[in-house]
Image (cartoon, grey):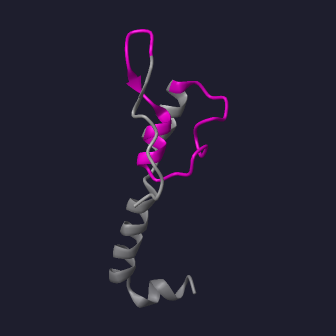
Amino acid sequence: MIGRQPPAPTEPGKNGPRLSPRFVEWLMGYEPGHVTGRGLARTAELRILGNGVVPQQAASALRGLLKVAPPKLLAQFS
């Protein structure tokens, strides 16, 4: 659970409602302003968010890999 209310999923566009980058940022679990609000164009924000890794998925993948990693490999990082 993210713990905060979601922003509106859409925003006004010249041809009707369009996807809000702030909503995508929220869906991915990032703090407000992690990508948005930095002066980038909406399309650039969505491109960055679309190419990003959802932190919760990355953490889950790492936990899974650590369970099956050989001890010799893990010892290199301790």
Percent across and percent down for residue 29 are: 46, 53
> Is the residue 69 above or below the residue 54 in the image?
below
Q: Is residue 36 magenta?
A: yes
> Is the residue 30 above or below the residue 10 in the image?
below
Q: Is residue 31 left or right of residue 4?
A: right
Q: Residue at x 37, y 67 (%)?
A: 61
Q: Residue furthest right?
A: 39
* Magenta stretch: dominant secondary structure: loop
Which region is colored magenta? Answer: 13-42
Q: Residue at x 46, y 83 (%)?
A: 73
Q: Is residue 44 left or right of residue 20?
A: right
Percent across and percent down for residue 30 are: 52, 51
Q: Nearer the viewer, residue 73 or 4?
A: 4
> Is the residue 73 above or below the residue 13 in the image?
below
Q: Is residue 24 magenta?
A: yes
Percent across and percent down for residue 49 are: 48, 40
Q: Nearer the viewer, residue 37 or 63?
A: 37
